[in-house]
């Protein structure tokens, strides 16, 4: 048998190259950082193919430090910013007014937000605002209850009579809604304990020094006339008022006031 007849051809196993595939490369290429994340010849081929696909694709140049607003406008438009602020579509909640909506659109457009980014920001704002509003309502109700507890402890069994006298005083001066005015922190003017004490003291002074008849000057019934009392009852018990909403913070106070006025009306 000759040497040529005894030679055995290599068998191709189809197995993936070993991790030392870089060893066949020149030394200066083996340590190149761009190859460190590639673990095989197959991986290098895939990386090359992806790079070739990017050739000729639309590229976006990021403006440098000296770029103008016009340069950035080109970038924002390519990234999906609408041509006109009115083209943004989002939901800011039922309580948002047109002025705030227009401001949001103009600001989103000026800062280069895409339609998708603006909608996502609007959703996040609505979620945050709803949570903050709920928290504020809870805090206001807790404050109102704390003020009532403080005054009940201070006035004892005379609490309701003193509060009723203060409410009557406001009615007499045609200022029944004064206690519902909102202060800067969101609380009602009627939830301020110092103001409640002031109304109570004024009512007590009038009852003692002036007399309700002299102050009213209308008829022999202290305080309000029958017409005024009936009008006040109608106002407090109108549809949609706290009188009909048991969960409203002013429900109990309104119901008690209506009962007191009816008792006064019926003698």
Image (tube, rainbow, N blue to C red):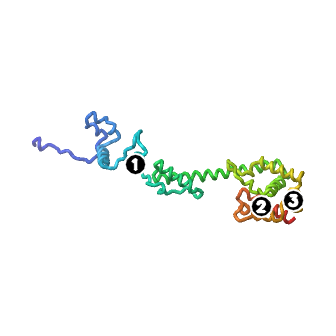
- Assign the C terminus to one quadrant of the image: bottom right
Within 10 Å of disc 1 (Cα), the crowding (few <14, some 14-19, many 20+) is some
Determine whether, in the image, residue 206 is placed left or right of residue 30. right
- Residue named by callout 3: 217
In space, the residues marked 2 and 1 are separated at their CA atoms by 63 Å
- Residue named by callout 2: 255
Task: Say if residue 263 shows up in the picture.
Answer: no
Out of 49 and 81, give the one closest to the viewer. Answer: 81
Q: Secondary structure at mark 3?
A: loop
Out of 59 and 217, give the one closest to the viewer. Answer: 217
**Percent of width and height locating residue 123:** 53, 54
User: Residue furthest toward the left?
Assistant: 2
Query: Mark 2 or mark 1: which comes first in sequence?
Result: 1
Task: Say if residue 62 shows up in the picture.
Answer: yes
Between label 3 and label 1, give the one nearer the viewer. Answer: 3
Q: Quadrant of residue 18 in the image? A: top left
- Residue named by callout 1: 74
């Amino acid at each position: 048998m000759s040497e040529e007849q005894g030679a055995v051809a290599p068998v191709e196993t189809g197995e993936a190259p070993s991790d030392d595939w870089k060893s066949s490369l020149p030394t200066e290429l083996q340590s190149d950082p761009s190859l460190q994340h590639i673990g095989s010849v197959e991986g290098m081929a895939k990386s090359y193919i992806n790079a070739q696909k990017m050739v000729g694709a639309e590229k976006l140049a990021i403006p440098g430090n000296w770029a103008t607003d016009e340069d950035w406008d080109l970038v924002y438009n390519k990234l999906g910013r609408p041509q006109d602020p009115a083209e943004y579509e989002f939901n800011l909640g039922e309580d948002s007014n047109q002025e705030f909506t227009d401001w949001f659109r103009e600001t989103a457009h000026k800062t280069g937000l895409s339609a998708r980014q603006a909608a996502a920001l609007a959703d996040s704002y609505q979620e945050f605002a709803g949570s903050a509003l709920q928290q504020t309502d809870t805090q206001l109700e807790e404050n109102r209850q704390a003020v009532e507890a403080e005054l009940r402890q201070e006035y004892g069994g005379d609490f309701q009579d003193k509060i009723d006298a203060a409410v009557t005083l406001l009615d007499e001066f045609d200022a029944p809604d004064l206690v519902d005015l909102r202060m800067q922190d969101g609380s009602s003017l009627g939830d301020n304990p110092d103001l409640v004490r002031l109304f109570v003291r004024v009512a007590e002074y009038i009852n003692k020094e002036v007399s309700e008849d002299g102050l009213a000057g209308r008829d022999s019934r202290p305080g309000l006339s029958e017409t005024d009392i009936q009008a006040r009852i109608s106002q407090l018990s109108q549809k949609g008022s706290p009188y009909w909403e048991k969960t409203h913070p002013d429900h109990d106070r309104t119901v008690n006031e209506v009962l007191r006025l009816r008792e006064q009306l019926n003698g």
